[in-house]
Image (cartoon, rainbow, N blue to C red):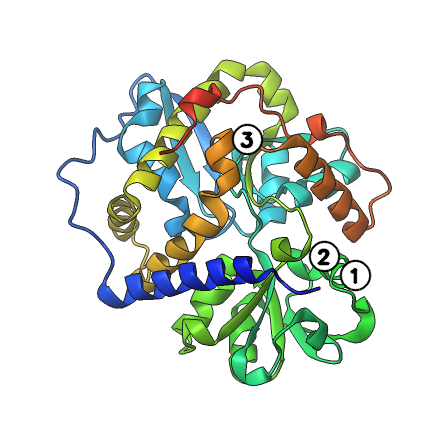
Amino acid sequence: MSIPKSSRRQFLQSAAAAASWVAVGGLKARAQSRGPLLVSQGLTPLKFTLSWLPSSMDTPLVTAILKGYFAEEGLEVTYERGYGSADSITKIAAGQYDLGEGDPYSMIEFNAKNPDVPLVAIYVHFNRSPFGIYTLKDKGIGEPAQLAGKKLGAPAGDAPRRLWPVFAKQVGIDPGSVEWVTMEPQLREPFLIQGRVDAISGFMTSAMPNLVRGGVKLEDIVPFLYNDYGLELYGNAVITRVQLLREKPEQFKAFLRAYVKGWQDTIRDTDGNMLALLDKAKADGQVLDTATEKLRLALAMPRLFVTDEVRQIGLGDVVPARMETSIAQVVDGFGLSSKPPLKKVFDNSLLPPKSERMIG
């Protein structure tokens, strides 16, 4: 199965635009006003876990904090770094966090194994999944079918790797026709650059910027993104405990109202709000590589966040039929015994009205 030429052309154009943005320094002038800073007095605390280290992908959350949108809703939202979706999901279930970012499909697997502490997604911000396989032009692999007989690299628990059988079947090759090489996450891109593997699985927003940071030209990366080959996957979502949602619906409604504003602001002024995030990270003692973060968000915005579907249904929601298909595909890929109903995976009842979630 080949990626439609129009989709590939669109992706290459957006990638080229992102590369150009990085090359010229991309960020606009610093905004004159960032809005009120959060004031903790009298606010209800909510603890949020990221899925990984803070990055430009977290700009909407940080924007809502820095501009006081959560405070206006009576909330004091604080966040901490994550250690991967599986870890974040476990900690949310254990009550260490009220809510956080995670992969809804890992959440489905968690719920199947832990039915007494069910979790649910309440806002899906990745309208398309960042899952994919990545190789380099000099490997001579121009289509997924050419991965047969090659070495692929990824950590053992990597979600795109675990879904490889579904992707492989979708593109018409034997899932067992490749050799998987297991390594630590930080070695994934170096292994590809060094030629120790022919391709890697991973998130587009991590693999591609990391390869560029390692000296690879963006145009020399060949991505096979799962959504381009028949998988109907959504990506990361805001997840919480079902019980907590029942106990504090108004607080979660307030959170989502403010979070949507953070997203809308970020979409309107992506570079300006990201600059504020970089400033906050520096103040928090975290060093972020500016060029990498700029590229990460430049790739993600048109490809994962601001899609035609989002323009139609608004931020945070899903198309039920598409989500049903994606759940079925993941249940098959993960080898789960049963397919959960949509309402136990995604609850959109607390989202602001569609008219308040639209983007220009």
Mark 2 or 3: the one toward you? 3
Q: Is 210 in front, or is 286?
A: 210
Q: Earlier in the sequence, mark 1 or mark 2?
A: 2
Front one among 343 and 288: 343
SS class, disc 3: loop
SS of the residue under disc 2: loop
Q: Amino acid at mark 2?
A: Leu
| Residue 4 position (above or below residue 123) | below
Locate residue 3, reporting x and y percent.
Answer: 62, 62
- Disc assigned to residue 265: none
Measuring from the top left, give residue 257's x and y in whole percent: 41, 23
Marker disc for residue 169: 1
Question: Is 181 situated left or right of 210 in this image?
Answer: right
Q: Which image quarter holds the N terminus?
A: bottom right
Residue 253 shows in this picture: yes
Distance from disc 2 to disc 3, alpha carbons, whole Å, reads 24 Å
Q: Which mark is residue 163?
A: 2
**Residue 224, picture quadrant:** bottom right
The quarter of the picture where residue 106 lies is top right
User: At x 63% / y 41%, what residue is drawn?
Assistant: 104
- Image quadrant assignment for residue 69: top left
Q: Is residue 340 toward the left or the right of residue 337 in the image?
A: left
What residue does disc 3 label?
A: 317
Give the residue furthest to the front.
6
Q: Position of residue 115 (x, y in %)?
A: 77, 31
Picture coordinates of residue 116, whole percent (x, y): 76, 28
Res 158 visible: no
Q: Amino acid at mark 1?
A: Lys
Mark 2 closeness class: few <14, some 14–19, many ≥20 residues within 10 Å: many
Question: N-terminal of the two: label 3 or label 1?
Answer: 1
